[in-house]
Image: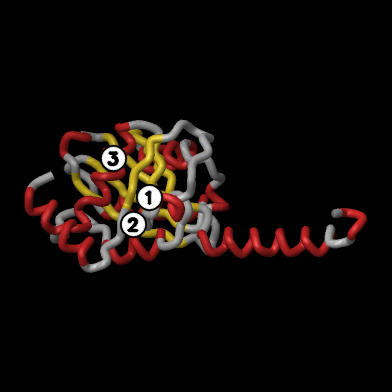
Amino acid sequence: VGAAMVQAVAAKAKTGGKVIAFEIAAPGAKRAPSWRLGVDVLLRVADEAECLAAAEVLLPMATPPQGLISVDADDVLALFEGADVVQTGIGTAAGAQAVDAAVAQALGTLPWKPEFLHGILLFLAGGDSLGMKEVNASMDAIMARASADCNIVFGAEVEPMLGDRVRITLLATCGKRKESHDASNWMMGMLEGKFEGDENE
């Protein structure tokens, strides 16, 4: 990245900025959650290509809006605040139903079913012909699959090199640290109550 970006990130970090870390992990691999790593958001990706794709979505948040629909930094950080792990999914397709197919492909690479997702950042990229029709189609496709209470943030950008193809990049989470912590405390309390007798010591 350029010197200006480095300075901007350093300045934000000094004023309590958020720390976003990337982790390349095999599907299903168990790793320490982000609160143990000391970062605000842990993005889990399958390989370097996914890492770069996710970075391309997030890095422009530190610069003035440039995309067709710019991703707002505050919206993204609020979406993933307290999330244990954020997974990355990518889908690419062409043709009449390209957007729907790309969304389905991106969701299919996530380890969770769409109905269990609590937060989704959907970023749509396409060629010069990309417009609000495709943006609306991506919104409809993700809302039809996700749960009604899922928080969704959208972004879109024209990338001429894609030609007639569209690419969907999803950053998604299904759980919050606080909810996981509350559930763990509830289960521990139940077990302690159930086995507190001397005969079960």
Q: Secondary structure at mark 3?
A: helix
- Disc number for residue 71: none
At label 2, which amino acid type do we have?
Answer: Phe
The x, y position of residue 149, in whole percent, is 53, 64
Give the residue pinned by disc 3. 53
Give the residue pinned by disc 1. 138
Other-residue count near label 3 (Cα within 10 Å), few / some / many at <14 / 14–19 / ≥20: some
The residue that appears at 34% across and 35% down in the rendered structure is: 92
- Disc number for residue 154: 2
The reply to whether callout 1 and callout 2 are in contact (CB within 8 Å) is: yes
Quote the CA–CA distance across marks 1 and 3. 18 Å
Q: Nearer the viewer, residue 146 or 17?
A: 17
At label 1, which amino acid type do we have?
Answer: Ser
The x, y position of residue 152, in whole percent, is 41, 59
Residue 19 to residue 106: above or below:
below
At label 3, which amino acid type do we have?
Answer: Ala
Residue 141 seen in render: no
The residue that appears at 49% across and 60% down in the rendered structure is: 150
